[in-house]
Image (tube, helix red, strand yellow):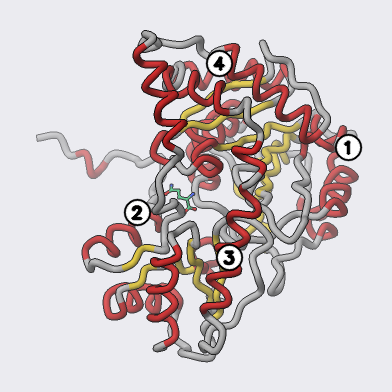
């Protein structure tokens, strides 16, 4: 028998993601699952019908590598309409296997051994292993305080001759904070005149609250010229299991992304692409999303009034951070486990995303759930 345990791992410290860990713990203990981010309500029936229609019409073989032109045209028009920038349909838009597929292709295409990549902590968990698998070095910058602010001076100090890429997430997962126009302008000042690539993860672009405007990197010329912007249909149209996302980037960057995209999946789900191309013709399908999720956030927070949890309302995303220091001093990973097993409610402990796993006694709860589920969850939280 060969001894594969002796093989050098590309990710020796790699672990099963916290999302899989907490979701399977929730299943095992029959707990309400507010851990992994996915809606527990269905995607629009009209959209499902459009997929079936595309299948019946025979769109069941490989689509073009970067996606069908009708969908790329719709996306180009949507971005132009929302953010005032025209991405070239033939060379600057690519449909990917979820935004994760886009993030993987973007990092793998550009990060070489020894390259540095600046990542803001708490950071979504796919960035760092992908950087490391390419031999890159993660340069963490911790976001600060209750509202997870970025100290741009500190970011400036982290930039070196080896900085290849900087990754931002706005609206930000897991904190629920949103980058302001001033944040983006600060970033523009830092990156202007450099060759640093910006990877902008904007998968929650349509889940943003209290009249805020999404500050897409595409709106800022000195960011757009170097930005790979990733987005997701799953988050916007309640179908995370379809694994459909896309990225946009200047042609020179997209050419390199294609080389990795071709090697990993070559192309993505054909009938879904026809369905989305049709569905995007009705902008209300995504323009009503901020209102829809703001109602959920407000419902969840008002249900929690009078409990011992404290919070700052999420500015965007479908996650709400709750602080529990008034309840217990135990480690967030232990508390999240105990909450799942003993109280039947699953969440995500924030320390796993923080610099040096700092435990600020915070848990992330996904409120993309039916009102009934949110009510049951709040009932449990009130008892603590
Ligand atoms: N994006 C989702 C979250 O943050 C989950 C993604 C995943 O499980 N990989 O919960």
Pointer 1 or 3: first along the chain: 1
Q: Is the shortest distance between ligand 1 and the CB of mark 3 under 8 Å?
A: no
Q: Residue at x 85, y 51 (%)?
A: 181
Classify 10 Å Cα crowding around label 3: few (below 14), some (14-19), many (20 and above): many
Q: Is mark 2 within 8 Å of ligand 1?
A: yes
Residue located beneath label 3 in the image: 297
Quarter where residue 71 is shown: top right
Q: CA distance from mark 4 to mark 3?
A: 36 Å
User: Disc 4 versus disc 2: distance between alpha carbons?
Assistant: 29 Å
Residue lying at the far left of the rendered structure: 1
Q: Is residue 261 above or below residue 178?
A: above
Crowd around label 1: few <14 · some 14–19 · many ≥20 (10 Å):
some
Q: Earlier in the sequence, mark 4 or mark 1?
A: 4
Asked whether the residues under the numbered discs 2 and 3 touch, taking CB atoms below 8 Å apart as contact, a structural biologist would say no
| Image quadrant occupied by the N terminus | top left
Q: Secondary structure at mark 1?
A: loop
Looking at the image, tell me whether mark 2 or mark 3 is earlier in sequence order.
2
Give percent across and percent down for residue 163: 73, 41
Q: Which mark is residue 192?
A: 1
Left/right placement of residue 74 relative to residue 3 reads right
Q: Is residue 278 above or below residue 367?
A: above
**Residue at the spot 62% in from the left edge and 18% down from the top edge:** 72
- Mark carried by residue 66: 4
């Amino acid at each position: 028998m060969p001894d594969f345990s002796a093989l050098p791992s590309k990710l020796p410290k790699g672990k099963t993601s916290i999302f899989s860990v907490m979701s399977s713990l929730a299943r095992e203990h029959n707990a309400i699952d507010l851990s992994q981010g996915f809606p527990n309500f269905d995607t629009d029936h009209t959209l499902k019908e459009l997929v079936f229609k595309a299948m019946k019409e025979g769109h069941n073989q490989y689509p073009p590598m970067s996606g069908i032109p009708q969908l790329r045209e719709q996306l180009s028009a949507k971005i132009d309409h929302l953010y005032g920038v025209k991405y070239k349909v033939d060379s600057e838009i690519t449909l990917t296997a979820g935004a994760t597929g886009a993030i993987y292709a973007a990092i793998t295409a550009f990060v070489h051994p020894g390259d540095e990549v600046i990542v803001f902590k708490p950071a979504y968990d796919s960035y760092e292993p992908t950087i490391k698998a390419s031999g890159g070095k993660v340069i963490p910058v911790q976001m600060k305080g209750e509202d997870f602010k970025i100290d741009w001076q500190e970011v400036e100090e982290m930039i070196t001759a080896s900085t290849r890429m900087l990754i931002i997430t706005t609206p930000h997962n897991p904190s629920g904070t949103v980058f302001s126009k001033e944040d983006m302008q600060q970033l523009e000042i830092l990156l202007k005149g450099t060759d640093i690539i910006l990877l902008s993860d904007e998968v929650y672009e349509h889940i943003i609250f209290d009249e805020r405007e999404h500050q897409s990197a595409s709106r800022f010329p000195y960011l757009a010229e170097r930005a790979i912007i990733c987005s997701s249909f799953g988050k916007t149209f309640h179908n995370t299991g379809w694994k459909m996302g896309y990225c946009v980037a200047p042609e020179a960057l997209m050419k390199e992304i294609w080389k990795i995209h071709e090697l990993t999946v070559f192309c993505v789900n054909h009938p879904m692409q026809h369905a989305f191309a049709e569905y995007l013709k009705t902008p209300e399908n995504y323009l009503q999303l901020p209102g829809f999720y703001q109602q959920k956030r407000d419902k969840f927070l008002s249900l929690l009034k009078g409990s011992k949890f404290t919070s700052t309302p999420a500015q965007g995303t479908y996650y709400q951070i709750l602080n529990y220091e008034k309840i217990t001093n135990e480690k967030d990973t232990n508390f999240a486990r105990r909450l799942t097993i003993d109280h039947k409610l699953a969440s995500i402990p924030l320390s796993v995303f923080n610099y040096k796993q700092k435990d600020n006694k915070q848990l992330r709860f996904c409120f993309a759930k039916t009102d009934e589920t949110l009510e049951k969850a709040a009932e449990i939280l009130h008892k603590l």
